[in-house]
Amino acid sequence: MDSADGMDDIVKEFIVESTENLDQLDRDLISLEKNPTSKELLGSIFRAVHTVKGTTGFLGFSKLEQVAHAGESLLSRLREGVLVLSPSITSGLLAMVDAVRTMLAAIEKTGSDGDTDYAPLIQFLTQLQAQEPDGKMRDGLVAPASSFHAVEQEQSQDTIAPGTAEEDRDDQLPLGQILVEGGHVKEEQLASALDQQMQGDPRRVGEILVARGAVHPEEVLEALQAQNDGPTSSLSSNNIRVDVGQLDKLMNLVGELVLARNQILQFSTTQQDSTFLNTTQRLSLITTELQEGVMKTRMQPIENVWGKFPRVVRDLALACGKRVHVEMEGKDTELDKTILEAIKDPLTHLIRNAVDHGIESPSQREAAGKSPEGRLFLRAYHEGGQVNIEISDDGAGIDLSAVKAKAVERGLIPQEQAARMSEREAYQLLFLPGFSTAQKVTNVSGRGVGMDVVKTNIEKIGGMVDLQSAMGSGTTVKIKIPLTLAIIPALIVMCGGERYAIPQVSLLELVRLEGNGARQGIESVHGAPVYRLRGNLLSLVYLNRELHFDSAAAQDSAQQDVVNIAVLQADDCQFGLIVDEVNDTEEIVVKPLGELLKGLSVYTGATIMGDGRVALILDVMGLAQHAGVISEVRQRKLSEDATPAAERARERKTLLLFQSPDDGRMAISLSDVTRLETFSRSSIERTGEQQVVQYRGTILPLVHVSGLLEERRLQPRGVSPTAEDKVQVIVHTRNLRSVGLVVERILDIVEDDLSTRRPASRAGVLGSFVVQGKVTEILDVDGIIRVQDPTFFDPEQLLTGVAS
């Protein structure tokens, strides 16, 4: 480790925590001197020193470990009552604290615990252990110099001129300079003291000034303390520990602020006062930034939980007579601390299950042609506003026939149902309460307690858990959980005259059927309503029927001229939810349901809307289970799984098709699309050379795709690609910044594999692909935006970009 810049996070955390412990040790040691029989103080001091010693040994700072060990041994004898605290012991312990503090500063600056020889201090602490119970020293041992002298000896650099001192000790000011700047001595007095020192006076500058009467000893002590504190840029002073309860309160207040912001934004739509509208827009931006900032304070890397698993696996593997090594990917993936705490126990149980049940013994693995050492792989990554966690082992896998037989034996399912169960449904039996296929009960597992709790705890926080296995190859458990539970984006819909919120993380797309499409587009398969979406059958759920609205309000789709379908994802199944109206998307603050409503499976919480009224948040998974569509979709997927593996392996992507400038077809990945909008040409304004439009309380810059593609360069921003009154815009958002891509005409949303490809023939495109039998160019979104605004993807330009 060459410098502080190269320190890893563990060392930085160690420095911060140890510095805080040392500050507390100073106070505790002084308090102990006044109350030497206090077991509570002794215990606190001993634990602090023991923590420092243990961590330093782990990190490899041997010199620091030796000093801490000597102090710990002395404290151990005090705690056992063999010794009684005396002034010499107090001085020795304080000297140890000063030495540890000095070494911590060296570690922060250079990465090592310094070159100072602490053997005399260690010897003194060791000899203090042989002190008589009455406090007298044996063998004529002399206590070390006072802490004043010890600190000064370590810190003093005043044998050189103040102007050059900082070059040698850039992390501290010289003592003389501190005294001069504090007005305690004059520059002439300091210069005279330095001259005397240069002529051979062995005393320190502070001692010379005190002897001359130029300064009081207390002022020198204050200056030494200021010198010892160092600059404000150290790790310890740049960090602050905050109680999680305080962060929770702050998050709740931000939630209330978001609600107030939404109410003001709704009110502002009826106002014309430009000053009020500008102030509202500024409030909205600040609220968004504050919300993001508070969210980040609660976010922690999943490594905080994963870091303990290698030790758990090692101990468990030894107990089971197995050899297992752990691999991790995505340790920096961040989650809300509340969610991190909620998944700690479920993940621990899954890890223990994998080692105990999944991975075989070395002899069994060798007999199966495997390495004697098993592999446990942990992976975490962000996808679609969620965190995905995978726990995989290369063990024996799960015997489905044994699972079904045990379920039949326990009376959980009849034999006929077991025979026709799909593979995935059979795996779900493992999550039933009390279910276990273990041949014997051990102190690790086998009692059938755990997997049901894992599923329950994951679903409590809005997540889902799935399991896949292959005999002889291993098992993978996949978990999907939300990033946070406090504030989420949601789609607001109407049904039966009431508003409901659908979490946007479960929303795939919106489909609107009108006229004959509404009356004839919905078909019936075995009595269940379905809609053919891009060639695939989509199961439909009528929200008004699931919520049991009266027949007058719940009109049949055959009698409607307009049908609104929200395509939702529940677990690995898609279904369409038919609602009366689709309003808009907005950020909502999740409020828990009361005790009387917690048993309703179709609701996951409630929120307060901009007008102050309450809207219920729909539980997409619960709604799918209540409507019974999950089993229907899974059965339909069985036939899809019968297709050749090569067909399934093709890369399929969902694309938004639009017309290219030369009347051809272009596409953009649907994951790059935030919204589709249509603006009147009269609403387009200009700021400098940039065309913009007022959009959802912000200023949205526009990029004309046709102008960029025709000339392979940025056209003058005043050039319009079409003379029509309306322009169609694809809104793309990154890092809270949005840009509008103006296109000729939006055609359709399709899903297809991209196996047939031709390299790009012009700037602004990624290449050409065959999509639904026609050659289609894929737009290079990042490339054309960078031509328009090179700083768009720079996080440091976030505030400037949003404010512009």
Image: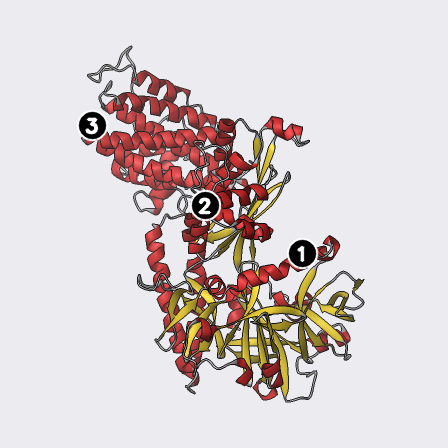
- Say above or below: 774 vs 483: below
**Sequence-first disc among 2 and 1:** 2
Q: Relative to the observer, which residue lies in front, 658 or 743?
A: 658
State the quadrant of the N terminus. top right
Label disc, if present, on residue 782 of the rendered structure: none
Q: Relative to the observer, which residue lies in front, 278 or 535?
A: 535
Please say if the residues under marks 2 and 1 sit with CB atoms less than 8 Å apart: no
| Residue type of the residue flagged with mark 2 | Pro
Q: Is residue 364 visible?
A: yes
Tell me residue 459's x, y (percent): 45, 55
Residue ID at (55%, 28%):
322
Residue ID at (72%, 74%):
708
Label disc, if present, on residue 346 of the rendered structure: 2
Label disc, if present, on residue 36 of the rendered structure: 3
Instruction: For marks 1 and 3, give the CA distance.
Output: 75 Å
Residue at which label 1 appears: 641
Tell me residue 655's x, y (percent): 67, 68
